[in-house]
Amino acid sequence: AQKVTQAQTEISVVEKEDVTLDCVYETRDTTYYLFWYKQPPSGELVFLIRRNSFDEQNEISGRYSWNFQKSTSSFNFTITASQVVDSAVYFCALSEVNSGNTPLVFGKGTRLSVIA
Amino acid sequence: EAGVVQSPRYKIIEKKQPVAFWCNPISGHNTLYWYLQNLGQGPELLIRYENEEAVDDSQLPKDRFSAERLKGVDSTLKIQPAELGDSAVYLCASSLEGTSTDTQYFGPGTRLTVL
């Protein structure tokens, strides 16, 4: 069965520090998609990135970057030069493809607090 | 383009009372999802609709929960009667199609408190 583990429950950093949020996943499927969502205090989950299992290239979007490594089943998320507005709960999620339309499975989230 | 709309944002009721949540997905999105998010947890799927058909409701507690999407657009999730353990955030999401590759876009959620 698919599973997503976000071992860091809470992280606190000072503004302008870099921070990495870890995500480890389990799946028996050879084809799957990984996602990151941000949930600010307002409650809405904001989509950040989607990555398929055949694309191991790292991705950078502004201050955000993602490191996908199939060898370690990890999809880590780094925020460079963190800002107070980055404070939120971040969720990693997994969706299998070949196992049918399985639900999107989320980790428990990592609460990031960026202190000014 | 408007995102997923949910109402109400907050609801406080006493146990054994009924409650209903409403969701309007992004225009043109065929698939609609209802999720339950308990405190400190990630969202968990309750039900998935493709147009007006519920294609995955295996996680919906059918003794007290019901949902409908009559015209394949907006949807209502109902709890009757509510129990203390139902206190949580109820999230609605939509996607263009219902495949595993599709990105789901979420609404702000309804925070339910059952007293």
Image: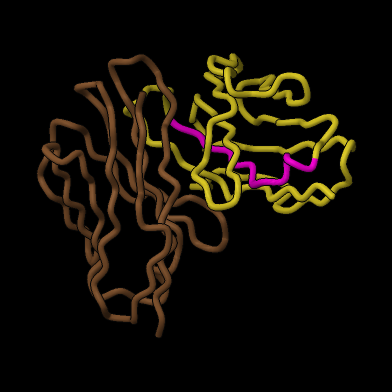
Chain colours: A brown, B yellow
- Spot the residue most to the bottom: A116
Q: Where is residue A31 drawn, in percent x and y?
A: 22, 23
Secondary structure mainly formed by the magenta segment: strand
Q: Left or right: where does residue B11 sit relative to residue B111?
A: right
Q: Is residue B1 left or right of residue B9?
A: left
Residue range (magenta): B84-95
- Indicate whether residue B90 is drawn in magenta: yes
Which residue is at the far front? A7
Is A44 placed left or right of A56 in the picture?
right
Q: Residue at x 23, y 67 (%)?
A: A63
* Residue at figure coordinates x 55%, y 63% from the top left: A41
The x, y position of residue A49, in whole percent, is 29, 47
The answer to if B79 sits in the magenta stretch is: no
Q: Identify the residue shown where x is 25% and y is 56%.
A: A77
**Above or below for B70 versus A57:** above
Q: Residue at x 25, y 21 (%)?
A: A29
Q: Position of residue B110 (x, y in %)?
A: 67, 47
Of A86 and A2, nearer the camera is A2
Q: Nearer the viewer, residue A26 or B31?
A: A26
Above or below, A43 against B100 in this view is: below
Residue B85 placement (x, y as % from top left)? 73, 41
| Quarter of the rendering containing residue A35 | top left
State whether residue A112 is above or below residue B8.
Answer: below
Quadrant in the picture for residue A116 = bottom left
